[in-house]
Image (cartoon, helix red, strand yellow):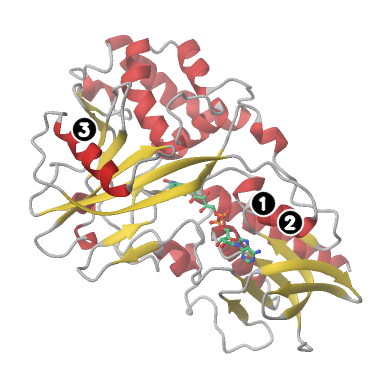
Amino acid sequence: MSNVVYDVAIVGGGLAGINAGVTAWEEGLSTILIESSDEFGGKLRSDRDDEGFTYDRGFQVNFSSYDEIPVYAQGLLGDLAEPFSPGAKIVGCGELNQWDPLKSLFCKAVSLPDLLKLLKLNLFAKKWQGFQTRQAAHEFLVEFGFSPNCIAKFFTPFLGGIFLDRSLSFSARQFLKTWFFLSRGNTVTFSEGIQCLPGALLSEFALDPSNIETAFHKRLNSRVTSIVPSEGGLEVSTNSALIRARSVVIATDPSAAGHLLGQQFKADYKSSICLYFSSDKQITNGLNIVLNPTSTALINQLVPLSNVNPACAPKGKHLCSATIIGERPESDEELAVMAINEMNSWGMNLPPLEFKRAYRIKEAQLLQDPGFEENVPSIETHLSGVYLAGEMTTSSSINDALKSGRLAAEAALAYLKNK
Ligand SMILES: Cc1cc2nc3c(=O)[nH]c(=O)nc-3n(C[C@H](O)[C@H](O)[C@H](O)COP(=O)(O)OP(=O)(O)OC[C@H]3O[C@@H](n4cnc5c(N)ncnc54)[C@H](O)[C@@H]3O)c2cc1C
């Protein structure tokens, strides 16, 4: 066992763990970030194939209004792809711009009263922080006065795609919070894929390894198996080493955190399947996502990725993703055929599509039932000097994962100062 005792050991190298590490490191603490997989990023991973296509492991976007991305990283994110157009194309209904509803007078998913309600909702969402409710999003939208047609044709696929739940039974407060961030900026991806975000956070520029005292140490392929108090601190065992630290931040998924702390955390997730298709021709025109309002939908949304980000496909090729909500028993190839048949029935004159690959994400979004916010685990744990971070302590979003990491690192810092 090495004699090094880190100020903070962080377990889990997703966004929460990375931001906990960055926060601790910026405070001058010696920090080690321990990740069980082969790369940092957690749920934000991208793959590039030999042909030059870039695939995110599940369709994800960043909102430019997110306020937890550290300023230094914003300049390191590489080229931003073109933002998505506000609103969406809704199959069989035309285009809807929910931020500028009066431009959507001819959209068949909304009536004039719905458009006025959208204007009202955009103002109402600004107050999401003070809005206490145990309503589900569907109940809230009905009470707010949206027509059944608007809820079925627009909100169901739009919010269904964000929360991976077309029944809209998730927390209305969480919906309002998301609506607030969506309405205040652009919806963007990164030209080299969503994994640019953890990459920028961890860039060598920001985390100067030359300062040995306070260097940011990183370990991949190291699964933490136990954390036990010992004389003068904590012993963190991985599959290959014993690491000593004065404090620990656990930023894993709920089951791993429960295992390390000897307790159980609620770990119910929504799943999704992301299918990628390429074509020699542009797949749809414009920068909008395409929503499927059909009640029997297989594909919830089609996203013309190379329209917003030409760098995700090789020259002369185009790439799109199609998201299925939930799990399916069919093989990837069977799903691809079913998806192409369904998308061809939309009357959009789609070009021939070639199936590239599928990602099945079983643990995609935490179940965010009405009132879940009151029951998320606290960042304090029963072990002195050990803090919890990650989406399980806040909610499933890039911004909240980053925030949870910052808060846990601040708690560890306060603990070390008072020791
Ligand atoms: C398909 C999909 C779409 C999404 N869309 C959006 C979106 O559009 N916008 C948005 O804001 N958010 C979106 N999210 C949510 C967002 O990506 C997550 O909330 C966020 O990335 C969670 O970060 P985290 O650090 O809390 O957890 P994770 O990313 O899950 O990181 C946990 C890390 O801990 C590691 N780990 C686990 N056990 C151990 C152990 N014992 N030892 C060491 N390491 C361990 C894991 O390998 C992992 O890297 C989406 C998520 C998915 C999956």
**According to the image, label 2 marks what residue?**
259
Q: Is residue 298 above or below residue 353?
A: above
Secondary element type, mark 2? helix
Which residue is at a point 51% across and 60% down the rendered structure image?
A: 42
Numbered disc total: 3
Residue found farthest to the right = 231
Marks 3 and 2, the one that precedes in the sequence: 2
Circle 3 SS class = helix
Place of residue 102 in the rendered image (x, y in percent of width and height, measured from the top left):
25, 21
Q: Hey, which quadrant is residue 385 in on the image? A: bottom right
Q: Is the CB of the residue bearing disc 2 within 8 angstroms of ligand 1?
A: yes
As helix, strand or loop, the secondary structure at mark 1 comes to helix
**Residue at image mark 1:** 255
Amino acid type, label 2: His
Numbered badge on residue 342: 3
Q: Position of residue 234 (x, y in %)?
A: 82, 72
Determine the residue positioned at 14% across, 41% down: 284
Where residue 88 sits, quadrant-wise, is top left
Q: Nearer the viewer, residue 274 or 408?
A: 274
